Image: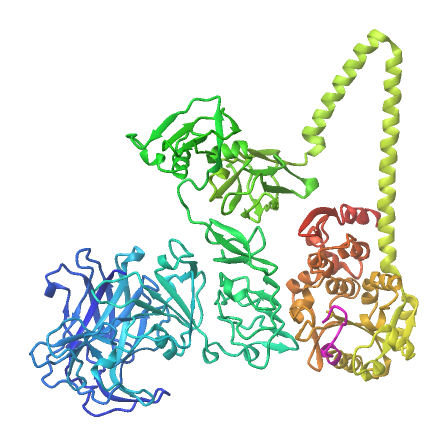
Amino acid sequence: MMLFTLFVFAVATPSSGANDDALALHTGEPAVVVRVIEPFNETARFQTDDGSALGLPPLGIIELAPADGDGTRADYLVGYNHQFGLGYVQLVPPTREKPFDCSGATHLVLRYRVLAPPSVPHATFLRVALLDSSDSGEPETYMHFAFDVLGNDVDEPRELRIELCGDRSAFSPFWNMGSPGDGRLDLDRIAGFRLEIASDVMLGEKVTTGAIAFERLSCVCEQEHVKRVAAGECSSARGGDGCRRVPNVRLTKGARFRVEYAHQECCALCAADPECLYFMLDLSTKVFEGQPPLCYIGGDALPPDAVVANGENPLSDAHERYEVSVMDSSDKRGLLCTACRCDGATADCRGADLAFVPVADASFSPRRLDLSENPRLQLIDPGAFEGMTDLAMLTLPAAAAHVSPEALRGPALRSVAFAPGDSPARTWVAADSPTDFFQELCCGRADLGVDGVKACDWTPKSPGIDCEYLKNLQIHDVDPLYVVTTDSFFMAEAAESATKCGAVCELADNCHAFTYVDDTESCYLFPSGFRISFAEVEGVSLTSGLSPRARAELRNAVVLAEPSVVELSEGTGYRATIRLALGATPLHGAVWISPRVGATVGLEGVEFRPPRVALYDEESSVSIEVSLSSSEPPTRDVSAPLAFDVLACDAAFVYSDLNFVLSVVTPQENGGHSGRGARRRKQRVILAAEILAAVIGAVILLWLTRSVCRYARKKRQLEDDRALLVSEQVKSAIERVGEFQAHFTVVPGDAFCAMDRLKTHEQLRSEDVLLVYDSVADVSGAMDLGFVFCFLSHQWLGWGEADPHGKHMDAMRRAVQAVARDAGVPLASVRVWCDVVSIPQKNRSEQRLAIASLPTFASCSNYFVAVAPDATHADTRCACGEASYRSRTWCRAEMLSCWSRNGVANMYLAHGDGLQPLMTDDQSLASSLDVFGGELTCCRLGHADGGICDRESLMLPVLGLVSEIYRKRNEDRADAWEFLEPILDDLFPRTFEFVQEEGDGETRTHRVLFGDLVEAAMYAV
């Protein structure tokens, strides 16, 4: 690391804020100030030097002024001198005759504030040096080679705290770099100090600017500190207790907040810092002879994108220049069941804001551990799951860039998955998915012995690695381009081995094959057009091979894609699928493929999902969806070249010839191009018929006339059938919302509130508690008698049980009581509808009819109450509450049903012991009405049974509601139609994407949902 620095030099001198008496420092820590060296309250005392003392051109500028509050403000600009590498300015107060006495102190503390953040973030540092009055007459300089990184925490008080111990060892806190004297920092003779601002010019910046307020420099005694008594003890022995090394990874330097020249073990420095959970040792940089490694002391979490694969050969320790370690104690990382929710055999750490995996509790070993929704958890160290001997199922966060393979070798572990979300490129472990990538392109995929993940099978790049080698392969029918021997003037190294012969062939543009003869040490390079055979030649040992370009041609080592013409049209919803595969398995590493559209006028907004995929063998394939993101398709048919950017370790696949076409076909008014084409074809047919009629007579003309008549009758019949079908669908939709399809079953309010838990329909039927209404008219009649109907809407908290822990029952009880109070009726006069209570759970036929009637049930109730207290789903362990309730398709269907007939007036959200409005503004209403944009369990499970999607089940009831709103657009629901009309196409889509999981893959098709039924319903009304 090259540094250029700004020196702030101050020789010890009295000031109005400094005295010779010990001062108390109240910081909440067990420390006492022994001496204030400089309070920085007299700015005028300081003078500056711009580098001329070293005979250098000006290296920096500093402007001083009193700071707002305490201290001195320093606005700095530090330049770079390529010869010296340092920029500095000295602040020199008048000389003090009597040095400071810091005897009894253990640490030096500099208090400061960042007033303007540095222009080079994460690479601008502050450090300090002390001057010791020696017997030689020249002050000894003791430099503390540790950096406090200046960040963006403007106006936040900060402290640089350094142990007061110094000698000529580079491992000491203060290092004497050869100054005359006794070579030992004498605390009773502190003559002055120097502050430095430095920047790492390797980042490409030549100047750094910013502002700091220096507030106080003090000698402090920490009561808990055990002070070293011998000079040699400044450089302590290197140890490592409490730390765990993470091999084959490094961290970007911009992630660090403090850098030390490791005067003691990094582990000890990190252990002593309450915020430090990780550190990195940099073994590559040596500025001074005898300088120890740089130690990057980390904080309590890794910043984004901080983890990268290490080294030139990332799997070889011999090439490593960085060592990353993490703290492994529970004091630093916390305990698992303290940081997470431990229940039964599950540790649920979702949303726990973890930066590292907590330490396992001695008395609890989870069978399932869920670490998802922890975006700060980027690094999983080798011992992250120590003590979790029963761990069988593990969910890792999407943000985990580095997962140590050693961490996944638990005795019971059998399944590992990465949570969905935006994922970084992984280092050595990635999901078993074509859209999850390793950072290193030349990673193959190796099994780890657990399902769901693969390890990086890294292959070092070497000459000739991309060629295919075969013993005793003979090449015929072409003459060699070149014959290379050890005596050749050019490329003689090709004659040294078969792999070097192959490497030379790979470099030559016209070389497709080669033969290496061991006995004569000769390399033969051949063009294309050859023929091959296998035969042993007595007394001759030869190895032949194919270059990458020949393997692409002869071994089909290319990327395969279909279809060659990708068509987007209105009929497909302007979507299509590209299927990608490999014609052969690469010799090593992956093949990365990124589709793109060539520049074409009139075609914009083409999206590819995912934008990039990786393939590893010829057995795998992957689909990419291409679509138009623009809401308005092109106004004319457009074709554009569709290209594929291919990156591959195996060079053969770079030769893939993928010349494809993307075609966008737009609908045309009055038949457009297709209509004109049809008319032209018809004209040709008629002309041909006339000519033919002139030749063979009226028989052919009569036959043609009869054919046209049959076609017209068939067309009219199809149109009539279509009209009848649409009419029947609209009629069925209106009937579905006009009357119950199943019994409307409710429970009296007092009986409902007396239940200790949610009981099923069958249980309450056996207790003779249920009340049944056969028609909407029956419900209206009951309302006329003073009964109040309350529809309770909620999200199930378990797959097999609606409310496993009674969370919703408590909220429902309070909601029913609140409804009775609001309506001014006794609790017994409330009629409560709730799905698990009112819908049969065992008879599937009756259950389907009741579910189809949900919109009608909801719309004919006086009160619609959403019950959505904060809870946790018993099976998925996902958080459930108001947000998840509003996202569910069935919940949205119930809200739409009630709103369509009753408006928002009687729609409530259960809140505490009362009710609050469910719809607070137009935005919340619009999102709640977006039924078909909601979440469905059948879609999450991938429609494995191949049945219909619940969206299709809901289509007709919702169509009926829309028809009813349209019919009343000039009556009492005029406001509803006014709200719906602008967003009809968004809320009631013509098609939807149906995804069905099949084995290891999935198929995606577009199915018709509403089609043109909304327009047909409006026409019918």
Q: Would residue 284 be found to the left or right of residue 662 on screen?
A: left
The front one of 849 and 346 is 346
Q: Is residue 424 left or right of residue 636?
A: left
In the rendering, at what x and y percent does residue 71 appear? 25, 79
- Compare residues 971 and 432 and report the one nearer the observer: 432
Residue 731 in the image: above or below residue 654 = below
The outermost residue toward the left is 137
Give the x, y percent position of residue 624. 60, 45
Decide which of 874, 961 is in the foreground and name it.
874
| Residue at figure coordinates x 68%, y 50% from the top left | 1002
**Number of marks in the image?**
0
Instruction: Kindly indicate the quadrant of the structure image that contains residue 233.
Output: bottom left
Above/below status of 338 relative to 411: below
Q: Position of residue 243 (x, y in %)?
A: 41, 74
Task: Please check the rendered image and state whether residue 805 is part of the magenta-colored stretch, yes or no.
Answer: yes
For the view shown, which residue lies furthest in the top direction? 695
Region of the chain picked out in magenta, as a range: 797-810
Question: Which quadrant holds residue 505?
Answer: top left
Residue 940 in view, yes or no: yes
Q: Quadrant of the N terminus?
A: bottom left
Looking at the magenta stretch, what is its main secondary structure? loop
Q: Which residue appears at 59% of the width and 46% of the height? A: 629
Q: Quadrant of residue 683?
A: top right
For the question of whether residue 834 can be seen, the reply is no
Q: How is the image coloured?
A: rainbow
Q: Is 337 placed left or right of 951 in the picture?
A: left
Q: Residue furthest front?
A: 539
Question: Which residue is depicted at the point 92% across and 66% down?
Answer: 775
Residue 57, position as x, y percentages in the image? 13, 59
Residue 118 located within the stretch drawn in magenta: no
